[in-house]
Amino acid sequence: MVMEIHLNDVVRLRKKHPCGNYEWRVVRVGADIGIQCLECDRRVLLPRRIFEKRVKAFVSQGRVSPPAGHEA
Ligand SMILES: [Zn+2]
């Protein structure tokens, strides 16, 4: 299954950034995925394949509504 990635999605990664934060915002979507640390604002570009491995969970999604049945 292909992971859907949208601009402004917020993701939680498996490994924490040196600044201590786990959550990143998606700032670029393409062959490479650009993410920005919510704590220190550092930006990183990762190949999609690597990005998908590092993501533990989506915290919020930029363009997609929460799944049906999810609490509003
Ligand atoms: Zn950081």
Image: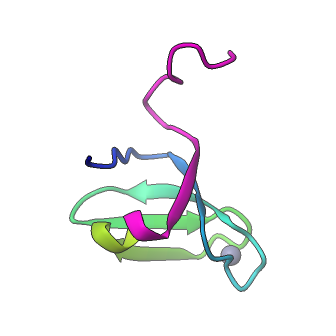
Please tell me which residue is depicted at 67% across the width and 79% down the height of the picture.
Answer: 17
Q: Is residue 22 left or right of residue 47?
A: right
Q: Is residue 31 above or below residue 18?
A: above
Q: Is residue 71 above or below residue 41?
A: above
- Measuring from the top left, give residue 46's x and y in whole percent: 37, 75
The outermost residue toward the front is 1
- Measuring from the top left, give residue 4's x and y in whole percent: 34, 44
- Measuring from the top left, give residue 27's x and y in whole percent: 45, 57
Please tell me which residue is depicted at 36% across the width and 74% down the height of the picture.
Answer: 50
Q: Is residue 41 left or right of residue 33?
A: right
Q: Is residue 44 magenta?
A: no
Q: Considering depth in this image, is 25 or 41 the residue closer to the camera?
A: 25
Please tell me which residue is depicted at 43% across the width and 31% down the height of the picture.
Answer: 63
Q: Is residue 27 above or below residue 4?
A: below
Q: Is residue 8 above or below residue 53?
A: above
- Measuring from the top left, give residue 5's x and y in whole percent: 37, 48
**Quarter containing ligand 1?**
bottom right
The outermost residue toward the bottom is 18
Q: Considering depth in this image, is 48 or 35 the residue closer to the camera?
A: 48
Q: Is residue 30 left or right of residue 61?
A: left
Please tell me which residue is depicted at 24% across the width and 59% down the height of the picture.
Answer: 30
Q: Considering depth in this image, is 53 or 7 the residue closer to the camera?
A: 53
Quadrant holding the C terminus: top right
Quadrant of residue 23 in the image?
A: bottom right
* Colouring mode (rainbow / by chain / secondary structure / one colour): rainbow
Residue range highlighted in magenta = 52-72
